[in-house]
Image: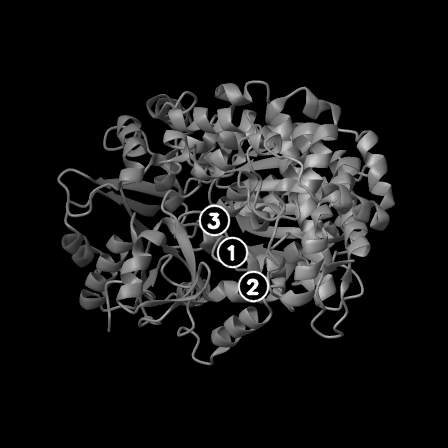
Amino acid sequence: MWAHSSSRGQQVWHGFAEHSRSTARLARSFAERFGAGELAEALGLWHDAGKCECGWQERLLVAGPNSPVGGNHWSLGARMLRDVIGPFALPVEGHHGGLPEVDALRHLRPQPDDELTLKRFYDEVAEARNLLAGVTIPESWQKDFLAAEMGLRMTFSALVDADHLDTAAHFDDAPAPDVSVPADMAALFRRFEVARTRALEEREPSSIDKVRSELYDSVLARAGGPRGVYRLPAPTGSGKTYIAAGFALKHAAQHQDPGHEMRRVIVAVPFITITEQNAQIYRNMLGDDVVLEHHSNLELDARWARLGAENWDAPFVVTTTVQLFDSLFGRKPSRSRKLHRLANAVVVLDEVQSLPLPLLVPILDGLRLLCMHFGTTVLLTSATQPPFETLDVWKRLRPSELVPDAPELFAALRRAEYEWRVDPKPTTAELAVEIAEHDQTLVVVNTVEHARRMYRLLRDCATVPVLHLSTRMCPAHRVAVLARVNQLLKDRKPVIVVATQLIEAGVDIDFPIVYRALAPAESLQQAAGRANREGRLAMGRVVVFDAADAPIPEFYRTAVGSTRVYFGPGRADPDSIVALRRYYLHLYRRSNIESGERARVIQANRGSLDFPAVADGPEVDGGAGGRDPALAFRMLDDDSVPVVVTNYDKHGHAERLLQRALHSNGRSRQVFRDLQPYTVSFPTRLVTACLEAGLLSQVVGELYRWQGPYDRVGVGIDENQNS
């Protein structure tokens, strides 16, 4: 019997027993690292049991290569395992369509051909029958529904990754599934140390280098501590990119317990821009073969793309918090297959203050469970550390502090003074005239629309180069702009940059003056980190403005309200640690974080193992009204789709990559990785209008191509400009 039709090159068919056993072995190897190896092996052996049905085999023979066979081949295995392991059979039921609610198992009923299908199945995989006598479930999962829920997610990940890897190996005529050899973390740490030393020797000296060096040594001296949660309250410009990576690599190298070795560092940042910049820094230090960059621009769940979905099989991963947490609380195979890599990993959450408040409780609970049950260490890095330990969900956690005297460090690294232009409110045009008088200025605003408007005003009135940065530009374009900006600054030449908030955290850039639209306190402080970053001036300037013709966006209003209470003219500046703590506590109360409806509903649905309700929202009117996305776990409430920009690249490279992705039937992860620099996350709400206007075309499934003009010099995509 067969599991899959003929491979692409050698035209070899995939034997059923071979696929079942290979998937089981791989799944076991992944899940053994968190104590669920026996469970994952059982799921792997049984996941495709329904393919032994005569009708399915007949349909496979006539379907042809790469064609769907149809029919349900998963529920037989799920039903048989249900009576042995209960809800832990859910990964089998969901390994194609996604994790369902637990009631889906209760509704499974025997089918007329099951007896014959089972006989044929046992003839192929005789050892599967033995598993019906019992399968070991980790004891802690049986005592805590939320631990069980996270365990289900991790085991589901192990199953679907194993299934996809073995299937892809067959179709590619590979001798074995593509699984990397575990990295030597101690060797990687030594390589990092050498590269850091070389990078520091090559860069222009700064007056704060001594403080940075002492901080690095002090933090890394604590890397031998136990697994758990660590907090790094590092001011902007303190060398946090190096410190976090150095701590993570050394911590992993020093935790090599047999069977639970730490094999991976995962750095998650809030903005794609930081992903791009940090990934390049780490690639330069560790090598292209070590560092994987994976952000949220290109994540497809269409059938043709699943085998090429990213699985984080690399020792050093740079991703976004959107990708990390939407995957952690998602339910689709393409998102979930990477999750088992979080076990025994060091997860660095950069700029942790950017986590969305309505989702803070489930996020913190997920991190708690990863640390308690899956051997994960979490490093929280930020210049504006939120007091998460004041929330009930983390009351029992005590993060280890890596900087014992943070106020003293912040005072030593204070490099800018604030000015407030909030009363009376200036207009954008008035601000543009004022900004145009300066030689080197960074302007950070809250929305893409305001950035475009400010950029065009400055372009028309300034006598110096004016550049633009926003998420409507493809990553390759943004990287090129940042490189040009840094070169101009290095050469002491004039330049004005207008950007959205994507530049305000983690981007290594240094201006004498920063203009920042009024925003939450932590955003103001992050933007200030781009002013006099290297300490070459006595003091940089940060001008906070509230433009009369650019209202505070809805997503910022609650936090800006709390900001006005503690910061502004006659009050504290946003770099006051004491004022920031009071601000966060006030914001938590105003936002009703712990008892808000969204957090409560998500946590309740997690506890009841209703995975669709968590990812997509609870049913409305018993399902007749669909689902309520307002109560779902979604890092971004404004849904987006991946749009490939082929007309930024003049040489047609992006177009060739897109065609390769289509012709590979979605099986090559490397092609999807290579497409990331040319892919924009485009708001779903704009898709219909852009399709009708001919600005977008649908390539396949949820993947689109930009057909409109692309401004290579300025703003990139502008859906309001047709020519």
Q: Circle 3 is placed at which residue position?
A: 506
Q: Which mark is residue 19?
A: none
Return the x and y of residue 247 as percentages of the image width and height: 65, 42
Q: Which secondary structure, mark 2?
A: helix
Mark closest to the chain's N terminus, 1 or 2 = 1
Asked whether residue 59 is in view, the answer is: yes
Q: Quickly name the residue at label 2.
A: 672
Q: Is residue 192 left or right of residue 569?
A: right
Report the side of 564 relative to 192 (left or right).
left
Q: Earlier in the sequence, mark 1 or mark 3?
A: 1
In the rendered image, residue 212, in percent from the top left (x then y), is placed at 56, 44
The image quarter in which residue 86 lies: top right
Q: Amino acid at mark 2?
A: Phe
Residue sitting nearer the eye, 716 or 207: 716
**Residue in the picture at 62% in, 65% down:** 670
Rounded to the nearest whole Å, what is the CA distance between mark 1 and mark 3?
Answer: 27 Å
Q: Nearer the viewer, residue 568 or 605?
A: 605
Q: Earlier in the sequence, mark 3 or mark 2?
A: 3
Dot 2 crowding, Cα within 10 Å, few <14, some 14–19, many 20+: many
The residue singled out by tag 1 in the image is 300
Task: Give the number of the mark in front: 1 or 2.
Answer: 1
The C terminus sits in image quarter: bottom left
Looking at the rendered image, the disc whose residue lies closer to the viewer, 1 or 3, is 1
Q: Nearer the viewer, mark 3 or mark 2?
A: 2
Q: Residue 1 sits in which quadrant? A: bottom right
Query: Quick check: marks 1 and 2 in contact, CB under 8 Å?
Result: yes
Amino acid type at image mark 3: Gly
